[in-house]
Amino acid sequence: MRFSHSLSIPELGFSPSMEIYQFPSRHCITQLSSSKPRVQNHSFQQHGSQGNGVSLCGFQLGSQSSQAFGHGCNLQLGSRVGPRSRKLKVLSFGHGRSSLTNDCKLSGLDLGFCKSKLFQGSHLWGSDFSRHMHGRVELELEEANSRNFSFVVRSSSTLGVEKEVEREEGGAKKNYDAIVIGSGIGGLVAATQLAVKGAKVLVLEKYVIPGGSSGYYERDGYTFDVGSSVMFGFSDKGNLNLITQALAAVGCEMPVIPDPTTVHYHLPDNLSVVVHREYSEFVSELTNKFPHEKQGILKFYGVCWQIFNALNSLELKSLEEPIYLFGQFFQKPVECLTLAYYLPQNAGDIARKYIQDPQLLSFIDAECFIVSTVKALQTPMINASMVMCDRHYGGINYPVGGVGGIAKSLAKGLVDQGSEILYKANVTNIIVDQGRAVGVRLSDGREFFAKTIISNATRWNTFGKLIKADQVPKQEEDFQKVYVKAPSFLSIHMGVKAEVLPPETDCHHFVLEDDWTRLEEPYGSIFLSIPTVLDSSLAPEGRHILHIFTTSSIEDWEGLSRKDYEAKKELVADEIIHRLENKLFPGLKSSIAFKEVGTPKTHRRYLARDKGTYGPIPRNTPKGLLGMPFNTTAIDGLYCVGDSCFPGQGVIAVSFSGVMCAHRVAADIGLEKKSPVLDAALLRLLGWLRTLA
């Protein structure tokens, strides 16, 4: 029997699907201190107990347990381990538990943050289902047919509550401490951090799964990451491993696979540079390419490490909360002064102090472009340092099962803390009463109210769509004069025959073949991820996933008929694939088994990003991060989180934004210490500093 829950969506179609098959069970696991994985074949015992006419099988593996009704169940946890994934780490923080119990004789589901594939036969025929409960997840089920064993699954939208949360009868309001609009990583980190502190949080997500641009979708046996597969902040040490800390806070665990290289650059003049996990190997390779710039290379990246070490030594909380800020300053004055010194500076200015070679400076531009989609002169030095050092300090670690598991884990952790997440909840308005944000209104007319509102939407969506035009504060108008929307992307998700990739192919590649001036141009540079190099379970046997993306403007895709739009997608995608075929993988086009193309319009439609943008970029040369707004806004009770806030784009940056936002909100609702006098003074100071940008 096959049970599937799929949503047919054009273009990228980021859809959840659940498929149940019978597989032999195998689980690969190592401890953090291990250098080699232990591959164990587990056998499971069936504990005979009867419930409602079906038998109950119990399975246990480590600290996780799963229960399912049915006969002859096999359980597969972990993943198939490919050639490059021989080192598998398990980051264990607390005990995960998922269960499937059912009074309707249901055979299996794939829900929760750990992916279990269950198969059983029977006990579906002759039944009409009205509602099925998985923990505290509600699924509305329609009739099951005994001949084809298929049924339709419709989400009731609420994860974590057993009834929809809205205005109660008689007009009474069910209030929350915080409502979070959007379940991107920034929003989920803010929500879970608040929930752990004791706040009652409601997350409203437009789509049917969490994650936003860090989500996933499944097609034809492939599990595709919606966005980047390069996961910073996901190690087991330091203070900048913010994803790890966020998961640990809610008792979640995720196995990860270390990536031996962050990225392999393929640049003009046949410049090929591999950014190795080990810093010494990377510096050795780069200085071998530019021996005359050895001292400049060491000094530039040395400054990066100085900034990173200062950040990594601090307990990261809100820079808008003075009690914390002053406390950190008195404990770590040198580190705080270091960060204050580099706050208004850009990576390009620092690089030019130590490096003169034009080609090497262009390489630094490419390094920064990956971070911020702009060159080094427009990339804040603090942002560049976080990424350029964390890739060596904690390394890039890919979550087993795909990036989408991070958001699923955080969503589960949020629910476990007693808070709620509501799917298919399209927020259209933030309700402002007497100058204060007090609630939100959905497209279906429902309203929800809270002490605070946190928007994980872009700044342009928040102040332009969710907030009425006549309510947009002057500060936000000023921000939009200093910053413009970052470009969107053309995305190509492909499944290809495995033999087209040479042995020892790296997971991530950056391609700019013959002209440095094309770096920032639409379709000029290509970023490529091949996550199946690390985790082969993401694709069918004998297949690899290629996720290709390149910058693109939404204006390039507007005003086209449907026929012309589809034709243009194929034309542009074929050109990108042809370039990769010539540069990296001969025979690539003929090896394609699956292909799906998404444009900026796709990103706008499914991720609710204005023009498909991924954060702000400075209109001119900025003064570092001085111009970036923090989490508070000029509307009382309204906060922003995500890539439109300090410190900007990227998983590690939006996680930092989420941590900061949760701390500031917690102080404002009485869950953390605060000083109203100091608060007002600090916020005025930060506002003045932004005017200098």
Image (cartoon, rainbow, N blue to C red):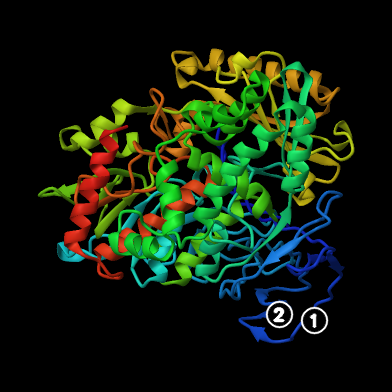
Q: Position of residue 239 (x, y in %)?
A: 53, 60
Q: Do the CB atoms of the residues marked 2 and 1 lie less than 8 Å apart?
A: yes
Q: Quadrant of residue 272?
A: top right
What residue type is disc 1 on? Answer: Gln
Q: Is residue 550 left or right of residue 617?
A: right
Viewer-side residue, 87 vs 360: 360
The percent position of residue 668, horizontal first and vertical second, equals 25, 62
Q: How many marks?
A: 2
608, above or below 111, in the image: above
Identify the residue position indicated by label 1 in the image: 45
Q: Is residue 227 visible?
A: yes
Please, is residue 672 above or below residue 312 in the view?
Answer: below
Identify the element where label 2 is drawn: strand
Q: In the image shown, does 365 or 102 lie closer to the viewer? A: 365
* Badge 1 element: loop
- Please indicate, yes or no, whether residue 132 appears anywhere in the rendered image: no
Q: Is residue 337 above or below residue 171?
A: above
| Spatial separation of the CA atoms under disc 2 and disc 1 | 7 Å
**Quadrant where the image shows the N terminus:** bottom right
- Amino acid type, label 2: Gly
Q: Residue at x 85, y 34 (%)?
A: 501
Percent across and percent down for residue 469 are 20, 32
Q: Quadrant of residue 60?
A: bottom right
In the rendered structure, the answer to whether residue 586 lies left or right of residue 565 reads right
**Residue corresponding to mark 2:** 58
Q: Position of residue 505 (x, y in %)?
A: 83, 37
Determine the residue located farthest toward the left in the rendered image: 434
Res 149 → quadrant: bottom right
Q: Residue at x 83, y 49 (%)?
A: 84
Question: Which is more N-terminal, label 1 or label 2?
Answer: 1
